[in-house]
Amino acid sequence: MATIRSSTFFLIFSRVVVVFFTSPCFSDPDALQDFCVADLNAATSVNGFPCKPDSQVSSSDFFFSGLSMEGNTANLFGVNVTAGNVLSFPGLNTLGISMNRVDYAPGGVNPLHSHPRATEAGVIILGEVLVGFITTRNVLYSKVLKTGEMFVIPKGLVHFQKNVGPGKALTLTAFNSQNPGAVILPTNLFASNPTIPNEILAKNFQVDETVITGIKSKFGSS
């Protein structure tokens, strides 16, 4: 009987451990105060910024006008991302949300990239935009969206947007992180500092090293 009781106890205990360590209590905890406006001049802590003293907080900390202004799309990709994250809007600190404005010139592309810390949801405000993402099984999901239509990009997956309409395009995107991060593949691979050796990139893409040199030159690297 003692052996049976021990086995039963171990089984129950192991199940409790599994449930406990996979439960939502191990996600980011809810804030324990009304707000925590980021002190951007302080050292970054493990998961966010320290709070400014309440005596230094003002109404302006909770309002951000950056997304109201059109971005300059005169660049290689014909796109401009205006980030409304904790780095530009300190009132978002500890709240787990942020937004971006993305402006597209005709034919502009938001290049292949991923957000390592957030799922993305977006809505087309102006124009027609091709939106797509690639799964870890190398399956592409994509669709052309028009004004008022919405999309979602699962956390961490590589994705892109392209303006396929006749004029400018505009999207607003939201993230479940105050600082979602962005890994932009073209600049990540061909404009890193220091640069990835040409032979590594050539082997990965199965091309001659001269091709890699040509691509790097477009990004001011070699």
Image: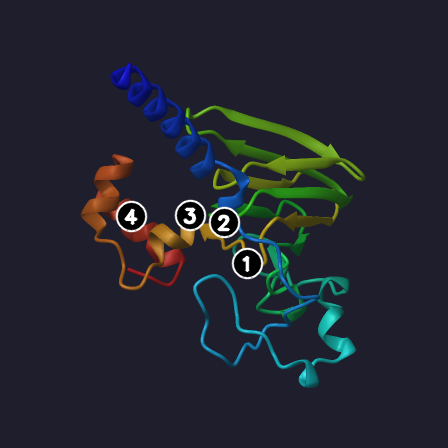
Which residue in the protein does label 3 denote?
185
Q: Are marks 1 and 4 in contact (CB under 8 Å)?
A: no
Q: Is residue 112 visible?
A: no
The amino acid on which the numbered mark 1 sits, given as a three-letter code, is Asn
**Mark number displayed over residue 117:** 2
> Residue 203 in the image: x percent, y percent?
21, 39
> Residue 34 in the image: x percent, y percent?
71, 66
Label 4 crowd (10 A; few <14 / some 14-19 / many >=20): some
Label 1 crowd (10 A; few <14 / some 14-19 / many >=20): many
Residue 64 picture quarter = bottom right
Pick the residue in front: 23 or 82.
Answer: 23
Residue 98 picture quarter = bottom right
Tell me: residue 13, above or below residue 67. Answer: above
Q: Residue at x 52, y 56 (%)?
A: 76
Q: Residue at x 65, y 28 (%)?
A: 143
Of mark 3 and mark 1, the one earlier in the sequence is: 1
> Residue 185 in the image: x percent, y percent?
42, 47
Q: Rounded to the nearest whole Å, what is the CA distance between mark 1 and mark 2?
A: 7 Å
Q: Secondary structure at mark 4?
A: helix
Q: Are marks 1 and 2 in contact (CB under 8 Å)?
A: yes
Residue 54 picture quarter = bottom right
In this picture the colour scheme is rainbow
Q: Secondary structure at mark 3?
A: helix
**Mark number displayed over residue 90:** none
Which residue in the protein does label 1 denote?
179
The amino acid on which the numbered mark 4 sits, given as a three-letter code, is Ile
